[in-house]
Image: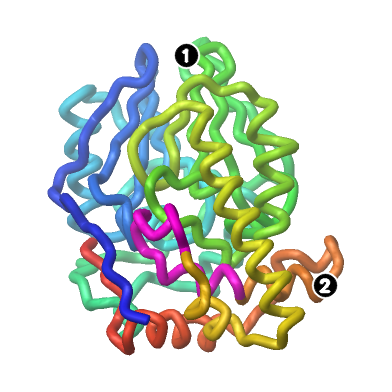
Amino acid sequence: MSVSTRHPDVSIPGRLEEVADGVFAYIQSDGSWMINNTGFLVASDGVTAVDACSTERRTRAFLDTVAGVTRRPVRTLVNTHHHPDHTGGNGLFTGATIVAHDNAREQMRAMGVPHNTGVWTSIEYGELRLALPFLTFADRLTLWSDELRCELIYAGEAAHTTNDVVVWIPEQSVLFAGDLLFNGGTPFLLSGSVLGAIDVLERFVKPLGARTIVPGHGPVTGPEVIDEVLGYLYFVKDVAERARAAGLTPLDAARGTDLGRYAEWTDTERIVGNLYRAYADLAGSAQQRGGPVNGPAALADMVAYNGGRPLTCLA
């Protein structure tokens, strides 16, 4: 199947939105492969940033945007998970304490600095260096921006990855959700768990009651995005159950699936990787969610689903 994905705007720098007093979302238009959202909080003694970007150019544009708001230094960088679109530029945050979940550090070390692999169209990453988080936590950590309480909370189980962290600001009802939530783009669960992501959104994210959500990719939104993503995850689960029972491979299942309204989302080829993960979920126990799958085979099948062409990356 040939996949056509919309890519309306990938301009640099991103769009800055003040989502609450002193709390900013940095939205990178398009939100597709390696084009993520970040954000920051401004305090009297410095800035807390939420995630880096994938390339030197994009991360420097984000840092320039921060500098256009305040002269205060970035003292803390929170990584919502280990994926390189959110961590590739970590090394450019000189002097900042890098914070992440316990599992993120080794995952980042294993993945290394992002580079072109042939799976995606080639981009210019620039001069990046691996900068691992050196303050990690297991479940929850409180961060203060002056007197504003920010709760860094581990999702509790494998979802988008095995190390997803949200930044929850209860006083302002603002949630930086990382890649637990995509708005207008296809979620990607190959590094995590489809069933785990359903549990996390139903049992953890939704009960927070956030009024303003900064997703990992796509425009700032409200709580309605949670049900949008859940709808897709239940869709993948249903396809996987039927296809696995019929003895279909994930690629054959994807090729025979009508994506319906989800065909309008970016990066629809992710259905293949998501089915690989859903098959593994269905074959194992809840304790095995997030375990290894054949990632290279899944990526190769995503390229095959895309008509044999590399997946589109515009970062």
Q: Left or right: where does residue 246 sit relative to residue 35?
A: right
Measured as percent of width and height from the top left, residue 196 is found at: 71, 54
| Residue name at image x 70 percent, y 36 percent | 204
Q: Considering only vertical position in the picture, is 58 above or below 208?
A: below
Q: Left or right: where does residue 83 sit relative to residue 37?
A: right
Q: Mark 2, residues whose alpha carbon is within 10 Å: few (<14), some, or many (≥20)?
A: few
Judge whether residue 231 is colored magenta.
no
Element class at badge 2:
loop
What type is the residue that disc 1 sits on? Answer: Asp
Q: Is residue 282 visible?
A: yes
Rendered image quadrant of residue 215: top left
Measured as percent of width and height from the top left, residue 308 is found at: 32, 89
Identify residue for label 1. Answer: 146
Disc 2/disc 1 C-alpha distance (Å): 45 Å
User: Quarter holding the C terminus?
Assistant: bottom left
| Residue name at image x 21 percent, y 64 percent | 314
Judge whether residue 274 is colored magenta.
yes
Identify residue for label 2. Answer: 284
| Residue name at image x 26 percent, y 45 percent | 28
Q: Nearer the viewer, mark 2 or mark 1?
A: 2
Q: Earlier in the sequence, mark 2 or mark 1?
A: 1
Q: Considering only vertical position in the picture, is 92 above or below 2?
A: above
Q: Nearer the viewer, residue 303 or 78?
A: 303
Q: Considering only vertical position in the picture, is 286 above or below 254?
A: above
- The mark tally for this picture is 2
Q: Left or right: where does residue 139 sit relative to residue 301?
A: right
What type is the residue that disc 2 sits on? Answer: Gly
Highlighted magenta segment, given as a residue range: 259-275
Measured as percent of width and height from the top left, residue 181 is found at: 51, 44
Measured as percent of width and height from the top left, residue 259 is found at: 47, 63
- Mark sitting on residue 229: none
Q: Is residue 44 visible?
A: no
